[in-house]
Image (cartoon, rainbow, N blue to C red):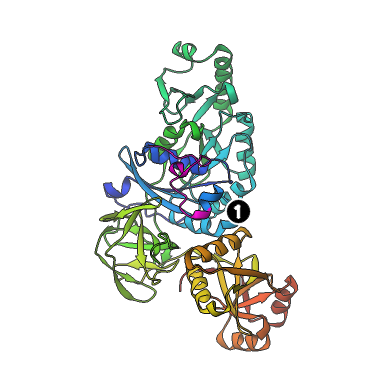
Amino acid sequence: MLDTAQNRPDLPAEIARRRTFAIISHPDAGKTTLTEKFLLYGGAIQMAGQVRAKGEARRTRSDFMQMEKDRGISVSASAMSFDFNNFRFNLVDTPGHSDFSEDTYRTLTAVDAAIMVIDGAKGVESQTQKLFEVCRLRDLPILTFCNKMDRESRDVFEIIDEIQENLAIDVTPASWPIGQGRDFVGCYDILRDRLELMDRADRNKIAQSIEIKGLDDPKLAQHVPAHLLEKLQEELEMARELLPPLDKKAMLEGTLTPIWFGSAINSFGVKELMDGIANYGPEPQIQAATPRQILPEESKVSGFVFKVQANMDPKHRDRVAFVRMASGHFKRGMKLTHVRSKKPMAISNPVMFLASDRELAEEAWAGDIIGIPNHGQLRIGDTLTEGEDLRVTGIPSFAPELLQGVRAGDPMKAKHLEKALMQFAEEGAAKVFKPSIGSGFIVGVVGALQFEVLASRIEMEYGLPVRFEPSQFTSARWVNGDKQAIEKFTNANKQHIATDNDGDTVYLTRLQWDIDRVERDYPDINLTATKEMMV
């Protein structure tokens, strides 16, 4: 964790009320539905669209690509800002599908906490575990929401044990479910001694809550069937004996996660979770950078690009850089220095997002996420400051696990294809390598579904049908070392050498043996599977 100065002043009120978080989960655990309900409670939308509903009218708000709408999955991370009580929530929805893990990883560099959504029947699934590891690397505080309690689900203690064992994190219940599946009537809110009852009739209705004084309150018996009440009292007594109480410090250090139970599709348990984020979630945090850290309360503005999305509006070839504000109070029209090129940029039309709707952002504070439309000047990993030479660190780029050749259906359009590929490479959607021998490009991705997404986007956005073809290479490594050593190495291995879209030298491999051979024959050359996204 970053060292925090002990005698730091309190954050300005505007910054202190910001909560910037991501939602992570395995596909199908209900992440997009939960996002919708957040917007519903934040008053940002009037009616939540269902992921599986029919017709255009009920599309979800956070999935804006055609492919996301067709398949009902989230492919790219999207950002949304809305107010809840006295707090400003900046929520980043990440792709759950494992093929998009790199986009998710970078998104997690831009948030201060994560909400982990778990399916009550399936418990901790493989992708949840992978994403959790990423949060662990960054010591992110985690809040857990166990979804789908209104369907047949597993025993609550079993779910909690599984989280503790698989993820090696302590769990403390913030609420406790009463019944499950068809018998699920609601939850007991442990933090506030309240009974929350679920209304099955109206999915968009806020749950009824009844204040009670402890578990012996006679009011409980009026609302909860006797056999369920007895079970609740028994289980809660066990939970209090076996599980740690909520300790905010341990939560902020990432060693303890509070868990809420509910059913996102029935809007149940969501408001309690949002209260939990507001009351227990972290304020905007210190940002790692060189040559010094960036504190959110600094008066000078700084921010960094963690994602670039091209063609969000298909009518215009626009590119929007998603920028996480790291410090200060930004106002529209400000001139900021683009640290990589050392050039000033006037930010005249920054936008705030509500999924695919956007509005002009007149101002933004540390912790906010704004979009800056640009024509390719901004790349992932870029830092913007008021003149100081600071570079935010820790935004990685991973070596692709799958490589394929690509060619345009129409050979006359090779130039157009190059332009499209470069755009996707800068967006971080794929790695594009130009081999030093022969023409054409090799495209590298983390998961196979990304090839489909690329082909469909190149056709939709550029009107270019393309074909991906098998390549003799299976993976790529960045080449590091001193200039002469690299030159000697590339001259001797020309058939394996390519450059990426930043112009860095890359070694394309067929087998692990290739990598072992380089390590043996060229001790002064270093092959790496990740590179830091800053120039």
The x and y percentages for residue 364 are 29, 55
Q: Pinpoint residue 365: horizontal percent, then vertical percent.
A: 30, 54
Q: Mark 1 points at which residue?
A: 98
Closer to the camera, 164 or 369? Answer: 369
Q: Which residue occupies the foreground of this view, 222 or 310?
A: 310
Q: Look at the image and tell me whether residue 529 can be seen.
A: no
Instruction: Give the prevailing secondary structure in the magenta stretch.
Output: loop
Quadrant housing residue 134: bottom right
Q: Residue at x 45, y 65 (%)?
A: 393
Q: Residue at x 54, y 50 (%)?
A: 70
Name which residue type carries label 1. Ser
Residue 148 lies, with reference to residue 182, above or below; the image says below
Q: Left or right: where does residue 385 sit relative to residue 146?
A: left
Q: Residue at x 59, y 13 (%)?
A: 227
Magenta range: 47-67
Question: Tag 1, which secondary structure?
Answer: helix
The image shows a total of numbered marks equal to 1
Work out which quarter of the rendered image holds the C terminus and state it. Answer: bottom left
**Which of the pair 296/468 is nearer the observer?**
468
